[in-house]
Amino acid sequence: MPGTPDKPEWKKLGRISFDDALAIQEELIEAYRRTGDGLPVIFSLEHDPVITCGRSTQDSNLLLTGDEYEKEGIAVRRIDRGGDVTYHGPGQVVVYPIIALRSHGLRAGEYVHLLEEAMILTCADYGIDAFRRAGFPGCWTEHGKIGAVGTAIKAGGITKHGLSFNVSTSLDHFKLIVPCGITDFPVVRLVDLVENEPDFEIAENILVQHVIDLLSD
């Protein structure tokens, strides 16, 4: 049985390209494999506009060509996480926990559940009733999907990628894809569900603190 897990170190990266954030994750994972030190860490950030395609992405869910996305100022990356296509951009809190699952006594499914729970608790802090939807990972409200989960579990049970939570993200960019391959439910944002415009940094702090608390239990 694992002992009490270490409290994750939280590092804010601000606005950063997907490629740079990916390199930071991979460097940390490689360093941990060499030394056995340096985890757990949580990165929080905003991405420059990017569409990421997980291992289950259907090309039909990309509604533009690569050149057309480039003209829109949106990068396209095919990556090693699970799931289908999604969009990341300014106004969206992205959280990448890099942890050793065994140290936290977690299995892959339990870890996804934990990330969903952090977003559900964040919504509750804003007076929003959020929930899971069977068969559709992420965080849902009665108005649509507000948060996505997309992870990769690397050798040794090390996590990579994580979650994204829409605070004031451009919904127009989501219209350039079929988000997560889902056509029956819209994407929504925190800003559209609360009376006063939410402060991005406060929402980021609330969400990350929930992740930290859940991982530290």
Image (tube, helix red, strand yellow):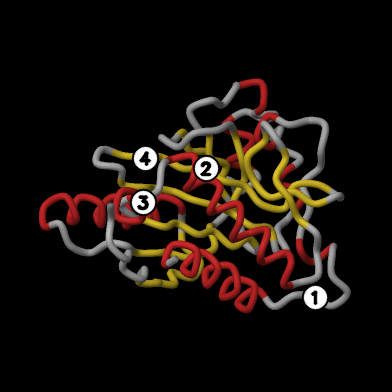
N-term-proximal mark, 4 vs 1: 4
N-term-proximal mark, 1 vs 3: 3
Q: Amino acid at mark 3?
A: Gly
Q: Which residue is mark 4?
A: 153
Q: At numbered mark 3, what does the secondary structure look like: helix, strand or loop?
A: loop
Q: At numbered mark 4, what does the secondary structure look like: helix, strand or loop?
A: strand
Q: Between marks 2 and 3, how big is the CA–CA gap?
A: 20 Å
Q: In the rendered image, which quarter is residue 124 located in? A: bottom right
Q: At numbered mark 2, what does the secondary structure look like: helix, strand or loop?
A: strand
Q: Which residue is mark 3?
A: 105
Question: Which mark is drawn over residue 197?
Answer: 1
- Closest to the camera, between mark 4 and mark 1, is 4
N-term-proximal mark, 3 vs 4: 3
- Closest to the camera, between mark 3 and mark 4, is 3
Q: Between marks 4 and 1, how big is the CA–CA gap?
A: 35 Å
N-term-proximal mark, 2 vs 1: 2
- Closest to the camera, between mark 2 and mark 3, is 3
Q: Amino acid at mark 1?
A: Glu
Q: Between marks 1 and 3, how big is the CA–CA gap?
A: 38 Å
Confirm or deny contact between disc 2 and disc 3 (CB under 8 A): no
Packing grade of label 2 (10 A; few <14, some 14-19, many >=20) is many
